Amino acid sequence: GSGFYLDFGSDDMNTYISILGNVNCTGGLSLSDNSGGDLKVRGNMTFSTGYTFSPKTRAVFFTKNGTQVISSSSLTTTFHYVVFEPVSGSTTIQLSGTDLDITAPSTGNAISFSSASDVFDLNGRTLRIGTASTNNSISGGGTFKGSITSNITLYGNGTVGTLNFTTGFQVLG
């Protein structure tokens, strides 16, 4: 696969880049080392065999009014921060074929919901939030949608915030 690097040499991005469709990562994808050099995605994110993704303490913003899927050929995919930011309405992020670690290594909001209508659909997968010995939180009124085969693990110090669950989908494995 090929690579897409927002941190190449001394030309680190200082502003976000928007992808108006799907991101299909078959090679390398590296976000910026600089504040603000985040990734905004309006489509799905698919990580294929042999991919490398370097979030570099940057956020991935999901901007579609509707469902966006994170899928991967590996058992676990790692993001540093996730932000729900639809242009209008609400966003549902759904995991497919992969567990997700959202580590928030520089403290702060590991997950930021923009509205109470936003949904993080675990879809039978495991979501791990935070980093040990780090203050991490979840902001906003969005909900997690679980099942008896879904799991959430919280790491870090202090108060993570309120975990809201989609009505009828509060049971986890």
Image (spheres, grey):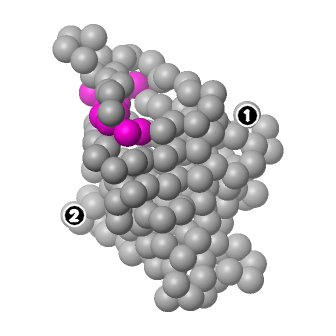
The amino acid type found where label 2 is placed reads Ser
Determine the image quadrant of residue 5. top left
- Quick check: is 34 in the magenta stretch? yes
- Image point (28%, 42%), residue name: 52
Looking at the picture, does residue 28 appear above or below residue 104? above
- Residue 77 % position (x, y): 37, 56
The amino acid type found where label 1 is placed reads Val
Mark 2 highlights which residue?
Answer: 133
Q: CA distance from mark 1 to mark 2?
A: 34 Å
Q: Quadrant of the N terminus?
A: top left
Mark 1 highlights which residue?
Answer: 87
- Whether residue 88 sits left or right of residue 4 in the image: it is right
- Residue 154 % position (x, y): 38, 72
Looking at the picture, does residue 24 appear above or below residue 98? above
Q: Secondary structure at mark 2?
A: loop
For the record, the magenta segment spans 25-37
Looking at the picture, does residue 35 appear above or below residue 159? above
- Residue 34 % position (x, y): 31, 24
